[in-house]
C-alpha cells in the first residue's frame, strides 16, 4: 500500500475527527486562541518595550567640548581614537561653525544675545563630539578613557578638551541604565511566565480532549492499526486547531491594533501598534501560525502516546 | 496453531488469574471456554493477542512465543486475529461503514477492496441497510453484528469472541452464535468465552471449563457443566 494512500487516509480521518468532535474541537480552539493571543500580545508588548527603551537609550550621550583653539584636524584625531573603542556605537561631530549656526537658530528671537554675539570678533563656541555607547553602563569607562587622553591634560600644547559632561549627568545616566535593565529583565520574565502558562494550558486541554478518545485509541490498536496510523489523525486535528486559532488571532489583531494605535503612540512615544502589526505582519503570521500548528501537533502526539502501548 | 505452555498470570495486586494452564488449539477448531466470572477466561484470550503478558510460561502462535513478537509483528498478529467483545468496542465517531473500513485500512488494503468488501461483509451479518448509521443509532444486537463484520473482514485465521452474547437478548444471542458457527464452517478457528449454557450447548463442539485460573475439564464435544 502506497504512502500516498495512507497519507490521504490519515488526512481524511483527521478532518473528519475535527468536524465530528465539534465540541471538543471548539474548546481546544478556544483555549488555543487565548494562548496564541497571549503570545502575540507578549511579542507586541516586547517590541513596544524595546522600542521605548531604545529611544530612551538614544537620548543619553556623553559630550566632549573642545577649546576654541583646537583645530578641526585635532578634533577629528580625537574622534578617531574614541571610535576605536569597542563600546562606542556612534560619534557625532559638531564643528565650530555648525555649533554657531545652531546657537543662532536657537536664539533667533533673542535679539540681545545675537547682538552680543555679533560684537564678538570671532566664534566663541568650540567644536564638540556627541558620543553614544552601545550600552548605558559603558559611559563611565568611555568618559574615563577620554579623560586619560593627552588632549584632556591640564596643560601643554596637546590640551584641547575643555570638558567632558559625563559627571554632571552621571546619576541620571546610571539611574536610566538601571531602569532600562530592570524593565528588560522584568518584561522578559513576565512575558515568559504568560507564554509558558498559556502553552501548558493549551497542552492540557488537548490532552483532555484526547482522553475522551482513549478507548477509541485502544480499539484501533486491537484492530491491528500501526501506531502512526492511530496517531496521525489526532496530530492532523491538532494542527487544524492551531491553524484555526492562529487565523482567529491574526484577524482579531487587525482591528485591535488599529483601535490602540493612537493611544499606544501617545503612551510609548514612537511605538504604534497598527504600524507594527502591518509592517511586521509576515513575521507575526509565521510566529503565530507556526506556534499554533506546532503546539497542536506536539500536544496531540504526546497525548496519544500515553495510550499507545505495544 | 495456538499453544499455551504452562502459563500463569498473576496481576499486580497478587490476584492469580491463570495458574499453570496448558492448552493446545488446532486450526479450524471451535473452542468454547466456559467458567464463572473471574475464572480466567478473558485473561486467557488477552495473552493470545499480547494485551497482557504471561507471568510464567509461554503462549505460542504458529509455533512462536507471542512475547517475542516485535511491535510490527504484533500489529500483523492482531490483523490476523479477529476480535469480538461483550461491549462491542466500535469506534463511536465513525459510522458502520467506516468502522469496518478502518480495520481494512489498518491492514493496508486498497480502496477498491474496501469498497467491495465492506458491503459484502455487512450483507453477511444482515446489516446492509445500516451502513451509514453510527453505533449509537444501533441496537445491541446490531452493534455486535457490526463488530463481527469488522472482525472477519480481513479473513483472519482466528476469531476471538469474549462473551459476545453477554449484552444480548436470546434472539440476538442465537443469531450471533449462528454467525460464529458459519464463520467456523468456512475454516476460521474460533475461541469463544461465555457463561451462557444455551450458547455452549447449541454450538456442540469442544468445551474447555475453567475454574479459579485452572482448566478443570476439556471435552471434545462437550456440554456446559459446572
Image (tube, coloured by chain):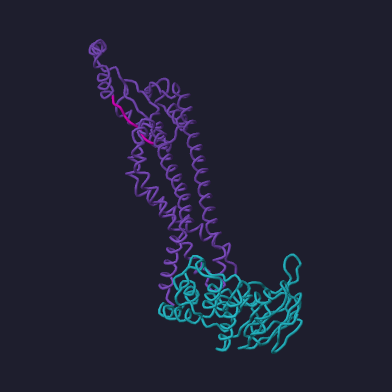
Chain colours: A purple, B cyan
Q: Is residue A21 left or right of residue A211?
A: left
The image shows a total of numbered marks equal to 0
Asked if the stretch drawn in magenta spans residue A91, the answer is yes
Q: Where is residue B207 shown, x and y percent of the image?
A: 69, 84
Residue A220 seen in this snapshot: no
Horizontal side of residue A300 vs B55, given as left or right: left
Pick the front one: A211 or A44: A211
Say whether residue B15 is visible: yes
Provide the major secondary structure of the magenta segment.
Answer: strand
Q: Viewed as shown, does residue A156 lie left or right of A71?
A: right
Residue at (38, 23) in percent of width and height: A161
> B162 or A80: which is nearer to us?
B162
Q: Which residues are magenta?
A: A89-95
Quadrant in the picture for the N terminus of chain A = bottom left
* Residue A14 in which image quadrant: bottom left
Quarter containing the C terminus of chain A: bottom right
Q: Tell me: A260 left or right of A111.
A: right
Q: Position of residue B134 (x, y in %)?
A: 48, 68
Residue A292 within the segment the image draws in magenta: no
Residue B136 on image: x %, y %: 51, 66
Which residue is pictured at 45% across the width and 57% down the height?
A22
Quarter-wise, where is residue A207 in the image?
A: bottom right
| Rendered position, B93 above or below A85 | below
Residue situated in front as seen by the camera: B199 or B65: B199
* Residue B74: percent from left, percent from top: 58, 76
Amino acid at each position: 500500500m502506497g504512502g500516498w494512500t495512507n497519507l490521504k487516509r490519515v488526512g481524511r480521518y483527521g478532518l473528519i475527527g475535527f468536524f465530528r468532535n465539534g465540541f471538543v474541537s471548539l474548546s481546544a480552539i478556544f483555549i488555543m486562541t487565548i494562548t496564541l493571543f497571549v503570545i502575540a500580545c507578549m511579542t507586541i508588548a516586547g517590541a513596544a518595550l524595546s522600542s521605548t527603551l531604545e529611544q530612551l537609550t538614544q537620548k543619553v550621550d556623553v559630550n566632549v567640548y573642545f577649546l576654541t583653539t583646537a583645530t578641526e584636524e585635532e578634533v577629528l584625531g580625537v574622534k578617531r581614537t574614541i571610535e576605536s573603542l569597542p563600546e562606542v556605537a556612534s560619534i557625532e561631530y559638531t564643528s565650530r561653525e555648525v555649533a554657531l549656526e545652531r546657537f543662532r537658530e536657537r536664539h533667533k528671537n533673542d535679539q540681545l544675545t545675537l547682538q552680543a554675539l555679533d560684537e564678538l570678533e570671532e566664534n566663541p563656541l568650540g567644536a564638540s563630539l556627541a558620543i553614544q555607547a552601545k550600552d548605558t553602563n559603558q559611559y563611565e569607562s568611555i568618559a574615563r578613557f577620554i579623560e586619560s587622553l593627552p588632549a584632556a591634560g591640564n596643560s601643554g600644547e596637546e590640551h584641547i578638551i575643555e570638558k567632558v559632561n559625563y559627571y554632571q549627568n552621571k546619576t541620571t545616566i546610571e539611574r536610566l541604565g538601571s531602569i532600562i535593565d530592570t524593565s528588560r529583565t522584568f518584561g522578559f520574565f513576565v512575558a515568559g511566565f504568560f507564554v509558558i502558562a498559556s502553552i501548558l494550558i493549551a497542552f492540557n486541554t488537548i490532552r483532555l480532549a484526547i482522553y475522551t478518545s482513549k478507548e477509541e485509541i485502544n480499539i484501533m490498536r486491537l484492530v491491528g492499526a500501526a501506531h502512526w496510523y492511530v496517531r496521525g489523525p489526532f496530530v492532523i486535528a491538532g494542527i487544524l486547531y492551531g491553524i484555526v486559532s492562529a487565523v482567529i488571532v491574526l484577524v482579531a489583531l487587525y482591528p485591535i491594533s488599529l483601535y490602540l494605535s493612537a493611544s499606544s503612540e501617545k503612551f510609548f512615544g514612537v511605538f504604534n501598534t497598527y504600524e507594527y502589526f502591518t509592517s511586521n505582519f509576515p513575521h507575526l503570521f509565521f510566529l503565530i501560525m507556526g506556534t499554533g500548528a506546532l503546539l497542536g501537533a506536539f500536544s496531540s502526539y504526546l497525548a496519544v502516546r500515553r495510550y499507545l502501548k505495544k | 496453531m495456538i499453544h499455551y505452555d504452562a502459563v500463569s498470570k498473576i496481576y499486580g495486586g497478587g490476584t492469580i488469574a491463570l495458574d499453570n494452564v496448558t492448552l493446545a488449539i488446532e486450526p479450524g477448531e471451535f473452542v468454547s471456554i466456559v467458567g464463572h466470572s473471574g475464572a480466567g477466561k478473558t485473561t486467557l484470550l488477552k495473552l493470545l493477542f499480547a494485551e497482557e503478558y504471561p507471568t510464567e510460561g509461554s503462549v505460542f502462535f504458529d509455533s512462536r512465543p507471542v512475547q517475542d513478537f516485535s511491535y510490527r509483528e504484533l500489529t500483523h498478529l492482531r490483523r490476523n486475529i479477529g476480535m469480538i467483545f461483550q461491549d462491542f468496542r466500535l469506534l463511536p465517531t465513525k459510522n458502520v461503514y467506516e468502522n469496518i473500513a478502518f480495520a481494512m485500512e489498518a491492514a493496508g488494503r486498497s480502496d477498491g477492496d474496501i469498497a467491495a468488501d465492506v458491503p459484502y461483509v455487512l450483507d453477511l451479518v444482515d446489516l446492509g441497510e445500516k451502513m451509514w448509521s453510527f453505533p449509537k443509532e444501533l441496537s445491541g444486537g446490531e452493534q455486535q453484528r457490526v463488530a463481527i463484520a469488522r472482525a472477519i473482514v480481513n479473513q483472519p485465521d482466528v476469531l476471538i469472541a469474549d462473551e459476545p452474547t453477554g449484552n444480548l437478548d436470546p434472539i440476538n444471542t442465537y443469531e450471533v452464535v449462528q454467525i460464529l458457527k458459519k464463520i467456523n464452517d468456512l475454516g476460521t478457528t474460533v475461541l469463544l468465552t461465555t457463561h451462557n449454557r444455551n450458547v455452549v450447548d447449541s454450538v456442540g463442539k469442544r468445551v474447555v471449563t475453567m475454574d479459579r485460573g485452572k482448566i478443570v475439564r476439556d471435552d471434545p464435544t462437550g456440554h456446559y457443566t459446572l
